[in-house]
Image (tube, rainbow, N blue to C red):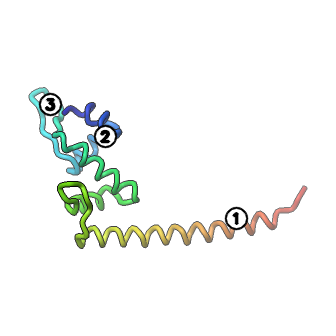
Amino acid sequence: MLINQLAHRSGVSTRALRHYDRLGLLSSRRLGNGYRDFADCAVEEVRRIRLLLDIGLSLQAAAEVLPCFTPDGELTSCPTARERLRGQIVQVDSSIAQLQHLRKQLAGTLDNLVDD
C-alpha cells in the first residue's frame, strides 16, 4: 500500500510514517516510480509504534522494544521491554516529584500575594 493509504488506515501522518521508515521502525520497498510500498502488516506495526510512543518511550527505545512483540501484536516480557518500561516508570516518578514541588511553590507564591 502507498504511504497515503497507510496514513489513512493508521491515522498517522505521512510525515511521521516517513520518519519511522527512515529510522527503520517500518519497512517498505520502493516502487519503480520511487514511491514507498508498505505491506498490509504495516498498519499493525504503526499501531505498535504508537502504543510505545503513547506510553512515553522515545523512538530509539521503541525501536529496541518492537522486537518484543509477538506476531499477533502482544508485548512479551522480554528483558528489553522490562528494562525500558522500568526506566520509563522511573522517569514518570521523577516528573511527578518535580511537578509536586512546583505545585507547592505555586501555592506558596499564591498564598503570599498581596491584594492591591
Residue occupying image coordinates x 31% and y 33%:
8
Dot 3 or dot 2, earlier in sequence: 2
Residue tagged 2: 10
Dot 1 or dot 2, earlier in sequence: 2
Q: CA distance from mark 3 to mark 2?
A: 22 Å
**What amino acid does circle 2 point to?**
Ser
Determine contact: label 3, label 1, CB under 8 Å.
no
Residue tagged 1: 106
Q: Quadrant of residue 65?
A: bottom left
Asked whether 74 or 91 is in front, the reply is 74
Dot 3 or dot 1, earlier in sequence: 3
Quarter holding the N terminus is top left
Residue occupying image coordinates x 51% and y 67%:
95
Q: Which mark is residue 34?
A: 3
Outermost top residue: 33
x and y, in percent, of residue 60 in the image:
29, 59
Rendered view: 88 above or below 27: below
**What amino acid does circle 3 point to?**
Gly
Q: CA distance from mark 3 to mark 1?
A: 55 Å
Helix, strand or loop under label 2? helix
x and y, in percent, of residue 102 in the image:
63, 67
Asked whether 109 or 4 is in front, the reply is 4
Neighbours of disc 1 within 10 Å: few (<14), some (14-19), many (20+)? few
Residue occupying image coordinates x 30% and y 61%:
61
Which circle, 1 or 2, is nearer the viewer? 2
Quarter holding the C terminus is bottom right
